[in-house]
Amino acid sequence: MKLERKTKEKDKEKQIQEEKEDYEKLNEQVKLAILGDGKAKLKVVEMLNPLIEYSIKRYCPIYKEYQDLYQDSVLIVLNCLENFDQKRSFPKYVKSYLKYFLLDTFRYLSQKPDMDSKDKEGEDILEKIEDNINIEKEYERKLENIALTKAIKELPPRQRQIIVLYYLENMSIKEIGLKMAISKWTVVSAKKKALKKLRSKINDNR
């Protein structure tokens, strides 16, 4: 019993030490990313990939929208790097933004008549993606070749405004609709079109 207890204590100490080292490595990359290091930004996205996937599963389990949700979440992480004041834990900072964004998205998408959060066709898409497609690596390649700010500036005025309000000013879809005097569905549609154009520009620069 004593030997078993000591083994468990050592395993726990080892786990704590590894988590501490991982946290320190993340902090180093966050500091470099804030200074504009592109490779560090990609590394932060890579290191927070488990948090992104967990947040999607927990707060917005609309599986057939997974790829769009993942892409949006990557932008959230990059936006957090732009606004982080380094006075708190970066993972917790990102987690709160992802939670707000995903819950807000889930509320509006789940109200659509043709949307079923447990759609059978997408029921196991997360597992299939994890097995067959390394999304994070795909986005590393894409993000290396895109000047996101320039791409946003090239969007049509309404789409550009919605992207800025949503990702940079952290306004909800409802708030954007009220500010721009348009319906929430128009906001959702315009945001999707804008992201599609951004993805197209990313592909063009690969």
Image (cartoon, rainbow, N blue to C red):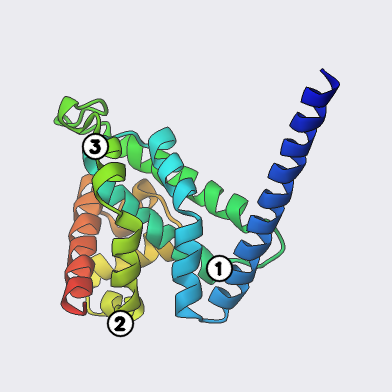
Residue 125, numbered label: 3
Report if residue 162 is visible in the image: no
Position of 31 with respect to 11 (left or right) is left
Can you name the residue that lies furthest to the front here?
A: 3
Front: mark 2 or 3: 3
Q: Is residue 84 above or below residue 181?
A: below
Q: Position of residue 195 (x, y in %)?
A: 24, 62
Q: Residue at x 37, y 67 (%)?
A: 164
Can you name the residue that lies furthest to the top here?
A: 1
Front: mark 3 or 1: 3
Few, some or many residues within 10 Å of mark 2 (<14, 14–19, 20+): few
Q: Which amino acid type corresponds to the residue marked 2 in the rendered image?
A: Lys
Q: Which amino acid type corresponds to the residue marked 1 in the rendered image?
A: Asn
Position of 176 with respect to 1 (left or right) is left
Question: Which residue is disc 1 drawn over?
Answer: 83
Q: Secondary structure at mark 3?
A: helix
Residue in front for this viewpoint, 105 or 22: 22
Q: Earlier in the sequence, mark 1 or mark 2?
A: 1
Position of 112 with respect to 50 (left or right) is left
Question: Pointer 2 and pointer 3: residues touching (CB < 8 Å)?
Answer: no
Q: Which amino acid type corresponds to the residue marked 3 in the rendered image?
A: Ile
Q: Is residue 120 above or below residue 81?
A: above
Few, some or many residues within 10 Å of mark 1 (<14, 14–19, 20+): few
Question: Pointer 3 and pointer 1: residues touching (CB < 8 Å)?
Answer: no
Residue 150, numbered label: 2
Q: Earlier in the sequence, mark 2 or mark 3?
A: 3
Position of 136 with respect to 194 (left or right) is right
Q: Position of residue 157 (x, y in %)?
A: 23, 73
Q: Residue at x 55, y 47 (%)?
A: 96
Report if residue 198 is visible in the image: yes
| Mark 2–mark 3 distance (CA, rounded to whole Å) | 33 Å
Q: Quadrant of the N terminus?
A: top right
